Amino acid sequence: MTSEIIPIGSDHAGFTLKAKIIELLKNHGFVPQDEGCYDESSVHYPQIGKRVASLVAENRVKRGILICGTGIGMSITANRFKGVRGTLCHDESTASMAREHNDSNLLVLGARVLSEDLALKIVQTWLDTPFAGGRHQDRLNMIEEN
Ligand code: RB5
């Protein structure tokens, strides 16, 4: 069991899926921190994306999760933050590669392009897969160089 805090945010398109992921996180001993949105009314994804990405960028949490309709807007938003490695994953294979090769610290999902079942499998894989390090770490260091 773990007591790791995981901030999670979505826009209206990801609201329903967010609730399911929060449930999964709780069932696995994580402490989800719901950063909104809090109902299905239309909101602007950058406002919520920035909230979660800044928590990761400031090292206040180890990792976070963002959801929008396609996952694209949240990805663009998240990856503006130095140190954030936001990865838009569309299946279990990309989720495990995002952890193994890219040390993903922010999982991004597209609620309108994934079934709920697949989205939950992606989250589970992303949570469970460790970073492989080695040559992959060298490449991540290069991303941070100016
Ligand atoms: C909202 O309609 C939609 O634009 C948003 O959820 C996301 O897909 C943006 O990339």
Image (tube, grey):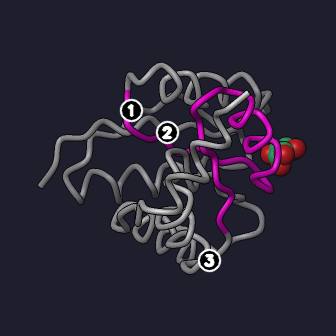
Provide residue 129's location: percent of width, then percent of height: 37, 68
Q: Is residue 23 above or below residue 31?
A: below
Judged from the image, the secondary structure of the residue bearing numbered disc 1 is: strand
Which is in the foreground here, disc 3 or disc 1?
A: 3
The label shown at residue 33 is 1
Judged from the image, the secondary structure of the residue bearing numbered disc 3 is: loop
What residue sits right under mark 3 in the picture?
A: 91
Q: Is residue 52 magenta?
A: no
Q: Earlier in the sequence, mark 3 or mark 1?
A: 1
What residue sits right under mark 2 in the picture?
A: 8
Residue lying at 56% horizontally and 22% vertically, measured from the top left? 54
Provide residue 39's location: percent of width, then percent of height: 61, 34
Q: Is residue 117 above or below residue 102?
A: below
Tag 2: amino acid: Ile
The label shown at residue 18 is none
Tag 3: amino acid: Asp
